[in-house]
């Protein structure tokens, strides 16, 4: 479809579905202007309707499903008002609706061949969507049981390890998928999991020792940056599975120490290339500190998507976002200097996992 055809189509959909007290494009009350990266809803003021967030979100819900599968609108937390270059003052402002191509799942049939042809330091999330690990602070992966968290985690670990992007440390309180992945890839010396003799407090105390070691590394690297601001460090990533289960029922002193160390790594780690990769069913305040959640700039929510499940990771109401169905689907957000603000429908990559992990 050409830009003019898309514009006429969106205008027709809004005329039929948007109740503006009898006002429509036929009465010259608004017009649609299609751009390369989205479209403008240009109202002609004065008008009988109010330009507010409620109207912005109503237009979003109508058009997002109407233009599928041509494009996917990027959900905004509040109305996105921009100025236009129209000479008529009544048309000098507009609602802006940015869009992107429909999310498509990345399928890797041969991991070795894929790695041979993708030698850069980026991590592909979907077709055409990748993250530069140099821009990552922390990665959070949330979802209910059976949503595909473990499968998604093994993809991140495999790419980070096989591309030699980052040195890995793994904390697995259940001695489950991450521990088995580490064993198969020869990272037993960098893996912590509880033994039968350990209590929960003993295990988290050992975790705190590892995290304290990483905090010490951060301060050592900061001293290097003091004299050499452009020094490039090898990335260090600590992966912690089932964070909520790990901290549940701990004595306050041990839990506070754990939270304090996580906060220090999250707040200070980016400049020194030290990262967190955290997995949990939810990231409420009893799972991780608020500072860790706010500093994380790569967030994935898998499984059931609604306002309740997304409240901890995203600032937007998911109502109106067209989320695919099935395992390994949900919402994805990356916040950095390269990507625009966006919450995208997520389809996690498909690839063959080595036997014995899942």
Image (cartoon, grey):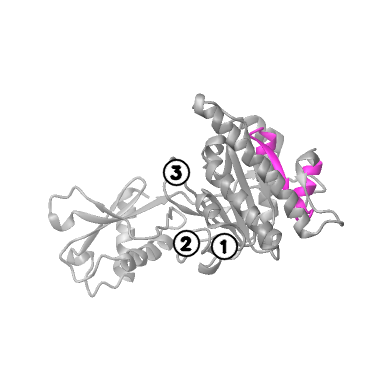
| Residue at figure coordinates x 69%, y 64% from the top left | 248
Query: Circle 2 sits in a helix, a strand or a loop, which is it?
Result: loop
Q: Specify which label sits upstream in the sequence, 2 or 1.
A: 1
When the figure is inspected, residue 19 is found, relative to residue 246, above or below; the finding is: below
Give residue 339's mark.
3
- Find residue 116 and report its image quarter: top right
In this rendering, would 201 be left or right of 58? right
Residue 131 in sight here:
no
What stretch of residues is rendered in magenta? 160-184
When the figure is inspected, residue 20 is found, relative to residue 355, above or below; the finding is: below
In this rendering, would 69 be left or right of 278? left
Magenta residue check for 246? no
Number of residues whose C-alpha sits closer than 10 Å to that of mark 1, classed few (under 14), some (14–19) or many (20 or more) = few
Contact between labelled residues 1 and 2, with CB atoms less than 8 Å apart: no
Residue at mark 1 to residue at mark 3: CA–CA distance: 27 Å
Magenta residue check for 169? yes
Give residue 233's mark.
none
| Residue at figure coordinates x 69%, y 52% from the top left | 151
Q: Nearer the viewer, residue 318 or 14?
A: 318
Q: Which residue lies furthest to the front in this view?
A: 253
| Residue 275 percent coordinates (x, y) | 60, 42
Q: Residue furthest left?
A: 88
Contact between labelled residues 2 and 3, with CB atoms less than 8 Å apart: no
| Residue 322 percent coordinates (x, y) | 49, 61
Give residue 321's mark.
2
Give residue 285's mark.
1
């Amino acid at each position: 479809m050409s830009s003019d055809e898309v514009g006429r189509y969106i205008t027709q959909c809004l005329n039929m579905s948007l109740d503006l007290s009898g006002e429509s494009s036929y009465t010259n009350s608004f017009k649609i202007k299609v751009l390369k990266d989205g479209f403008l809803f240009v109202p002609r003021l004065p008008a009988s309707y109010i330009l507010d967030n409620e109207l912005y979100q109503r237009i979003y819900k109508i058009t997002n499903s109407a233009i599928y599968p041509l494009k996917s609108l990027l959900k905004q937390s509040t109305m996105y008002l921009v100025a236009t270059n129209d000479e008529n003052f009544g048309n000098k402002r507009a609602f802006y609706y940015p869009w992107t191509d429909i999310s498509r799942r990345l399928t890797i049939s041969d991991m070795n061949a894929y790695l041979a042809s993708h030698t850069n330091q980026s991590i592909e999330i979907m077709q055409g969507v990748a993250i530069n690990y140099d821009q990552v602070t922390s990665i959070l992966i949330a979802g209910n049981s059976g949503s595909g968290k473990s499968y998604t985690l093994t993809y991140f670990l495999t790419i980070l390890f096989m591309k030699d992007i980052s040195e890995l440390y793994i904390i697995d309180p259940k001695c489950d998928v991450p521990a088995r992945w580490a064993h198969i890839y020869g990272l037993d010396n960098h893996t912590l999991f509880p033994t039968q003799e350990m209590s929960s407090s003993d295990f988290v105390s050992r975790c705190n020792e590892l995290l304290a070691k990483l905090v010490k590394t951060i301060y050592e690297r900061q001293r290097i940056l003091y004299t050499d601001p452009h020094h490039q460090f090898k990335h260090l990533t600590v992966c912690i599975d089932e964070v909520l289960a790990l901290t549940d029922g701990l004595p306050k002193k041990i839990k506070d120490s754990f939270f304090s160390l996580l906060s220090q790594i999250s707040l200070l780690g980016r400049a020194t290339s030290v990262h967190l990769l955290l997995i949990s069913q939810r990231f409420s305040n009893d799972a991780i500190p608020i500072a860790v959640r706010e500093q994380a700039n790569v967030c994935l929510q898998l499984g059931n998507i609604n306002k309740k499940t997304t409240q901890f990771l995203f600032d937007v109401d998911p109502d109106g976002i067209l989320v695919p169905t099935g395992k390994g689907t949900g919402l994805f957000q990356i916040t950095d200097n390269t990507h625009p603000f966006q919450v995208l429908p997520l389809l996690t990559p498909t690839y063959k996992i080595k036997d014995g992990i899942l």
